Amino acid sequence: MKRRTFLHHATRGLGAAWLGARPLLAHALPPPSQKFAATDTVTLGRTGIQTSRLAMGTGTVGSGGHSHQTALGVKGLSELLLNGYDQGLRFFDAADSYGSHPHVAEALKHVPRDKVTVLTKTWARDAASVRADIDRFRRELGVDHIDICLMHCLTESDWTDRFRGVMDVLSEAKQKGIIRAHGCSCHSIEALRAASKSPWVDVDLVRINPVGAHMDADPGTVISVLREMRASGKGIIGMKILGQGALSNRQDEALKFALGLNLLDAFTIGAESKSEQEDLIRRIAAAA
């Protein structure tokens, strides 16, 4: 089977205008001193889940059931995921709001299920909704279990109290083996701080890059919270590594920053073409 894939052509948002000539932060970390590869096998915190360092994102500017990746169609995106698999990537990053479950499901038909980590995200904010989502997600993905299920786009400082019902259902699903790990993606510094303190969070998806583009706070503040997460054994997956396109012309700097943090177990970047995907894999290998 000929496997056509894609890599991330990050969109240029409003931040790109002021970031174009702006140097990276003065406190940006030095380049990593060890070698890294996108295909390195990493363990996500204390979950025991092993996967590739690079996750294949499916939600660049993803909302309302659409994204730049799903615009490729089921065939195009599934072949992109398979191309990544052929290159050694083992991490599929999906979400209900991206509409990418059918695309991931098609790719999963062609690879051993136990060789791939499947992450997805729910917008449910009550127990009944998340219970229904878990059942629907498994049908849409064509799997009997989901490796990681996250509460998507949390912003509330009190989310660990407000959405306790959702957390309890996800905990029950984990106990039954329906999911392997639960956690959240955060879109405010208050939510991120709450996640760092919650023993319920197995995995956190956090926005991080060296210039603060599309992040919850300035990099220094976010890094301080990530250190707390690392100390408590949470799995940490970085997102917005290229600032949703603001750093698309400075990828090497951004990748060196992410790798040099020594805080991220893995990170997710969406690709839109095979050439972008393979270029990114090469850049990560060269970043050290």
Image (spheres, helix red, strand yellow):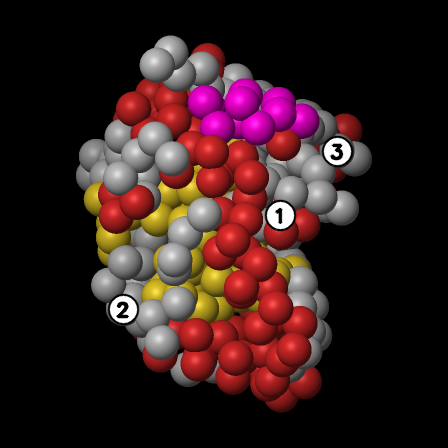
Residue 212 numbered mark, or none: 1
| Residue depicted at 48% across the width and 62% down the height | 149
Task: Give above or below for 13 relative to 135.
Answer: above
Q: Is residue 208 visible?
A: no
Give the label, 2 or 3, closer to the camera. 2
Which residue is denoted by mark 3 in the rendering?
13
Check disc 1: other Cα within 10 Å, few if <14, some if 14-19, many if 20+.
Answer: many
Q: Is residue 193 above or below residue 214?
A: below
19 lies left or right of 285 = right
Q: Quadrant of the N terminus?
A: top left
Q: Which residues are magenta?
A: 71-80
Q: Could you tell me how far apart the alpha carbons at marks 3 and 1 are, in whole angstroms?
A: 13 Å
Q: Amino acid at mark 3?
A: Gly
User: Is 116 on the left-hand or right-hand side of 22?
Assistant: left
Question: Label 1 amino acid?
Answer: Gly
- Residue occupying the point 49% across, 47% down: 141
Q: Which residue is mark 2?
A: 46
- Whichever of labels 2 and 1 marks the residue nearer the N terminus, that label is 2
Q: Is residue 59 visible?
A: yes
Question: Depth-wise, is mark 2 or mark 1 nearer the camera?
Answer: 2
Instruction: Give the crowd class for mark 3: few <14, some 14-19, many >=20 residues within 10 Å.
Output: few
Q: Which one is earlier in the sequence, the residue at label 3 or at label 1?
A: 3
Q: CA distance from mark 2 to mark 3?
A: 35 Å
